[in-house]
Amino acid sequence: MGRLLWGLPVLCLLAAAPPPASRSVTWVDLPPAIQTRLEQSGVTASSFDGRIATITREARTRVREGDLDHLVFYLLQSTHFTRLPPIEPALSAREFTQGLRSGASRGKLPAAVEARIAAFLKAVDSRDRDPRLSYFRGLIAEAAAGRDRRQRVSLEYTRAMTFLYGKEFLSRSPEAAAELYQTRGLSTDTAVEAGYAVHVGLNVLKSLDRSRRIRRVLIVGPGIDLAPRTGMLEVGPPESYQPWAVIDGLVAIGLSSLNDLDVVGADINPRVVEHLRAAAQAPPVLRLVTGIGDTDSVTLSQDYREYFSALGASIGTIRRGAPSAAGHLVKTVAVSAKAAAVLRAERLNIVTERLSEQPFDLVIATNILPYFDHAELMLALANMSAMLAPGGVLLHNETRASVSEDAAAAGVPAEQNRQVVIATVKGAPPLADTVWLHRRNK
């Protein structure tokens, strides 16, 4: 309605207000087994509210840093706003850090980076309406807030490269590299490949129970494709692929129907939520390109090729494209209005909050759990478990050793897992993902 109805009783107006989408978790919300495990990690009933407040405050900072990480990766790699050669972020991190250590740079950024920053800021001041550039135009205006933009971009470059150098060149083990993610900015990164493991998981779910029906789905952290850390492809506007891939897979496999399906995309980043809400109102045309392409040493698996070929047939109209020169598979999917009507979006911090809705049949949380320390991981699992209906399924791809025990303590013991091969690599392990299925206790 949008207007105040003057003269109506105040109680009437209050009663008409919609309930909040989410609420903060409390100590008494947690299963006793999770309470015990948290106490072993130093979080107690008396310190719990303070810990939640700290996580909430830190999350706001991490969301902002994640956005600005993407800005740095964009200005280094984009070929839209400049003809300067792209710069691979990890190589830039090494050049910058080694320059600092030798004293040769005297605190200056590499010349090629300086040139790209200048080109980026010039493009920001232009009338170019490219969707990605427009996104980062608004982001830098917000981040600089009237201060020197070049200085702010330089500071963010320094921060992002310091992290990247530590991850790529200083970490002595995969476990040490993984721990770095627990304090870094919260990335919105996503890619077409991320949907494949989920699709395999849904097929496993269907095979376990042919009569299974999924009507309510929660996707935690669907993200948006802005500017990845490496291998940036600017073939279309920024997009959130996972909700559409999930809807398509559920319908194609026979777990759901567009007639009664309700999918909620819940993200901590308000920009992602705004994007999903706009997409639900104006169905997008998805320009899908595999992040991995066939080369002399890399070969996409046949199963993945078949997945990509069928992707989108249940949610819209497919127009196939010829493979790109770099061996990437290409296609376009025009999402139908009926499929778009299935999707809703809410802002949610899965560590500290729960949605105030009826339980879900399926919760999907891929590529978000690595950002949480052990206590945060337990809280996220407890919140996802609480939002599942009895017998409902949690699907994720986290490989941390403690996840199975933590999930069981939260009431969602592990039931199945699969390794999913996306591509084979000559002389090296395959490019693969892992999918886990957990079922909520009845």
Image (cartoon, rainbow, N blue to C red):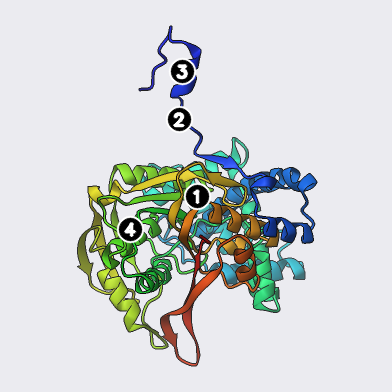
- Amino acid type indicated by mark 1: Asp
Residue 233 versus residue 59 in the image, above or below: below
Is 163 on the left-hand or right-hand side of 335? right
Q: Secondary structure at mark 4?
A: helix
Residue behind mark 1: 267
Residue 234 quadrant? bottom left
- Amino acid type indicated by mark 2: Pro
Residue behind mark 4: 247
* Residue 78 position within the rendered picture, expressed as x and y whole percent measured from the top left: 44, 60
Label 3 and label 4: CA atoms lie apart by 36 Å
Between circles 3 and 4, the one closer to the viewer is: 3
* Residue 153 position within the rendered picture, expressed as x and y whole percent measured from the top left: 60, 50
* Residue 58 position within the rendered picture, expressed as x and y whole percent measured from the top left: 68, 48
Mark 3: few, some, or many residues within 10 Å (few <14, many ≥20)? few
- Amino acid type indicated by mark 3: Leu
Q: Is residue 223 visible?
A: no
Mark 2: few, some, or many residues within 10 Å (few <14, many ≥20)? few
Residue behind mark 3: 13
Q: Earlier in the sequence, mark 3 or mark 2?
A: 3
- Amino acid type indicated by mark 4: Ile
Between circles 1 and 4, the one closer to the viewer is: 4
Which residue is located at x 53 percent, y 52 percent? Answer: 118
